Amino acid sequence: MFRGVAQLNLDSKGRLAVPARYRDAVLERCGGRLVVTADSDRCLLIYPLPDWEPIEQKLMALSSFNAQIRELQRRLVGYAEDVQMDAAARILVPPALREFAQLDKNVVLVGQGSKFELWNKDQWQELMDKADGFGTGGLPPELEGFSL
């Protein structure tokens, strides 16, 4: 399980050092083989390869005659790139994905259970500043009765 927020830096070549607290889990889960793809929130999603493969299979099994499904397939599968953690525990974030998520030197890696989100630091901060609850819509029905 990946959880927590880490503020990191991309190096001049676009490489990201995987934080030490995640390295063993990434190596154990997938041998350092990850998939990076684009998310509709303009961040990147980083999955261990074994966790990504069933998602990709399900997406590609859906009908591409539906315009919304086709757009989702284009974004998630079309942008998906295989990356390998190197001996220094870094991954290269592909240029097209760095551009898509507007990543510069300062980034935020957010653990989300079986995957990570990678954000431009300023965009992450804006999102967190706006995240003041559920707004006027109230609690989503899926969270009724949920307790922390």
Image (cartoon, rainbow, N blue to C red):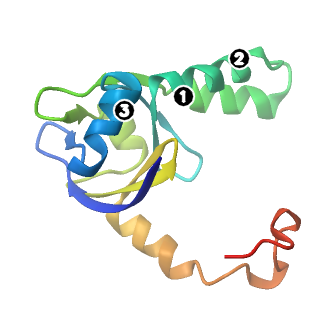
* Residue type for callout 2: Met
Q: Residues within 10 Å of mark 2 (few under 14, many from 20)?
A: some
**Mark closer to the chain start, 1 or 2:** 1
Mark 3 = which residue?
96
The residues tagged by marks 1 and 2 sit, at their Cα atoms, a distance apart of 15 Å
Residue displayed at 31% across by 45% down: 22
Residue shown at 17% from the left, 26% from the top: 86
> Could you tell me residue 37's position as x and y percent?
48, 33
Label 1 sits on residue = 51
Q: CA gap, disc 1 to disc 3?
A: 22 Å
Please give the residue where the numbered disc 2 appears in the rendered image. 60
Q: CA distance from mark 3 to mark 2?
A: 22 Å
- Front residue of this view, candidates 51 and 104: 51
Amino acid marked by disc 3:
Ala
For numbered disc 1, what is the local secondary structure? helix
Q: Is residue 94 visible?
A: no
